Amino acid sequence: MPKAEEILDGLHAIANDYVTLAKIWHLLFYILIVALLAGWKPSNQLLASILCLPLLTVALLAWMRGNPFNGTSFTVLAIIVFIFSMQISGLPVTMSQKPFVVAGILIMAFGLVYPHFIETNSHIGYLYASPAGLIPCPTLSVVIGFLLVFNGLNSAYISLAFVIAGLFYGLFGLLKLKVQLDLFLVVGAVVLLIKYFSLN
């Protein structure tokens, strides 16, 4: 396994070399959020499929930057989520109970402004250029946020997949890479685990 410094250097490089892609992802996330706030009710199946896409860009960038572990794990996660998405309800998404909605909004916001790794001259830059959609922890935070808000997309299997991924990457970032911010991802994954038990 690469040393912590090598992993951090790779994540830093991705976050700063692909800022344009990060901006595109932020635009897409914000459009999705606005559409949902405006009353759009996609099916659980459709929203699950949409949320596979940022996983694929994380996987692609990991492969391109010589991190086969992240490349493999996010490729597998995207495939698993897509397979499960084909098996869930085609009914419109439903909101979770208020505590889960609040937790989901907070963890989603954390992922969208994730301040680690990115170099910017202004704090405003975190709103549109943080590495959500580029590297694991902020991407998982955003997706877990959507799952918490929208009742786990009515899929215990998808929820469990993100609980496992969120706990692994959150604890790895916190304990191995010493990225203290990843505690938020751990908390989000634990809250999703609580939601998971309500889906069984």
Image (cartoon, helix red, strand yellow):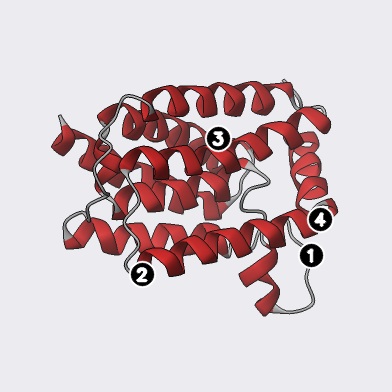
Quarter of the picture holding the C terminus: top left
SS type, badge 2: helix
Residue 136: % across, % down = 60, 41
Q: Earlier in the sequence, mark 2 or mark 3?
A: 2
- Is the Cβ of the residue at disc 1 closer than 8 Å to that at disc 4? yes
Residue 128: % across, % down = 66, 68
Which residue lies under the disc numbered 3?
172
Q: Earlier in the sequence, mark 2 or mark 1?
A: 2
Which residue lies under the disc numbered 4?
16
* Residue 34 or residue 129, whichever sits in front: 34
Foreground: disc 2 or disc 3: 2
Which residue lies under the disc numbered 2?
37
* Residue 158 or residue 35, whichever sits in front: 35
Residue at horizontal 33%, vertical 35%? Answer: 159
Residue type, numbered disc 1: Glu
Residue 14: % across, % down = 79, 46
Residue type, numbered disc 2: Leu
Q: Earlier in the sequence, mark 3 or mark 4?
A: 4
Which residue lies under the disc numbered 1?
119
Q: Does residue 142 appear anywhere in the picture?
A: yes
| Quarter occupied by residue 34 | bottom left
